Amino acid sequence: MTLAPDTTERLARARADLRMGVPVVLADAGGGAVAVAAETATSGRLEALRAAGPVLAITARRAETLKARAYDGDLARILLPADADCRWIQGVADPAGDLMAPMKGPLRSDREGSATLHRAAIRLAKQARLLPAALVAPLADPQGFAAAHDLTLIPAAAVMDDSLSPLHPVVSARVPLAVSEAGRLHIFRPEDGSDEHYAVEIGDPPRDAPVLARLHSACFTGDLLGSLKCDCGPQLRGALAQMGEEGAGVLLYLNQEGRGIGLANKMRAYSLQDQGFDTVEANHRLGFEDDERDFRLGAEILRKMGFGAVRLMTNNPAKVARMQDCGVRVTERVPLKVGQNPLNAGYLATKAAKSGHLL
């Protein structure tokens, strides 16, 4: 019997390390690299890595904003100037000061060799809910380097594995709700140590018939604070109210804040929106895609609860398609058009024009 962490557990440790500014070591068949998130990099660790010749890996979305060449397609490996410090690195990674200091270059991109480890470093930063940018320095002996510096070592292939981590039910308990006294909350925990997800079950919906269901992504500002910048809070309450009226339903509350980029990055996007960018443009300037959520989580929870077919409450055709792709039959799309106000008109227009929402 071994007490050592397996690869999945090491990945969870690596995500936590990056959030604290601790480097991690990535390895593949061709060698390895040490990586540290640009957002949490410190001057001391930058100096320790400088002799190894690190580059700053950023996504192609961020590179487009900076007019840097993304020779690797989905990312760019930015060569560091000799005098680059943490402020310069974080200025390239974070668009907060782009309008005040638009000339960050000219930035030169590396085009030689493989970008596999750089791609893994960006993926790991995203999983840690950090800005998608990382300092990456090559290593000839990744195993020896990790052991010498007591750093987490993980294979790049494990980071890039797109398999969904198994979800396990933890507990469920009755929770009387304003919309229905017959409420029950289910908690699901993924094996990979990432966020737990929840299912709110109203009544006792039969498992052999389509259930009225909603996949709702967490929105701290809308759901809890009543933000008028989005329609999330009204959608949450409207969906629960309709389920209460019908006497049955299930609302999946998925911890994928800010379309999967996390609350801190969502607030960065809000700040960019105050500069005049729409939601999609703001995500791109940060280095993210339009939507980083994984709706497979919803399908997996529905299956765990015994549901194979749904009447899906959504204005987003992508959710319908994803459920169908994952083997959950969608017998009806139930529109949920609530929460429109003068302050979110632009937000809703962008959802319709750029994300295909049916509003």
Image (cartoon, helix red, strand yellow):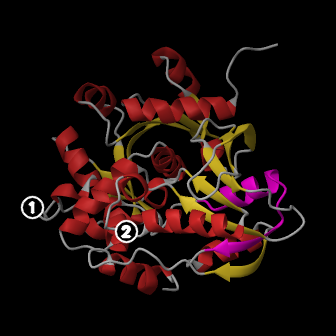
- In the image: residue 276, left or right of residue 253: left
- In the image: residue 46, left or right of residue 195: left
Q: Does the CB distance between marks 1 and 2 fall below 8 Å?
A: no
- Residue at the location (13% across, 63% down)? 103
Give coordinates of residue 208: x percent, y percent. 90, 66
Give coordinates of residue 79: x percent, y percent. 30, 51
Q: Residue furthest right?
A: 208
- Residue at the location (61% across, 50% down)? 160
> Which corner quadrant of the image does residue 334 belong to?
bottom right
Give coordinates of residue 151: x percent, y percent. 49, 23
> What's the CA distance linking mark 1 and mark 2?
27 Å
Q: 359 and 281: which one is in front?
A: 359
Under circle 2, the secondary element is loop
Say if 200 sits above or below 15 in the image: below
Residue 132 appears anywhere in the view: no
- In the image: residue 276, left or right of residue 118: left
Query: Label 2, on which residue?
Result: 230
Query: Label 1, on which residue?
Result: 100
First reached walking from the N terminus: tag 1 or tag 2: 1
Say which of marks 1 and 2 sits in front.
2
Q: Which residues are magenta?
A: 294-313
Magenta run includes residue 261? no
- Residue at the location (64% across, 30% down)? 9
* Quarter of the figure with the N terminus: top right
Callout 2 crowding tier (Cα within 10 Å): few <14, some 14–19, many ≥20: many
- In the image: residue 71, left or right of residue 8: left
Callout 1 crowding tier (Cα within 10 Å): few <14, some 14–19, many ≥20: few
Q: Residue furthest left?
A: 100
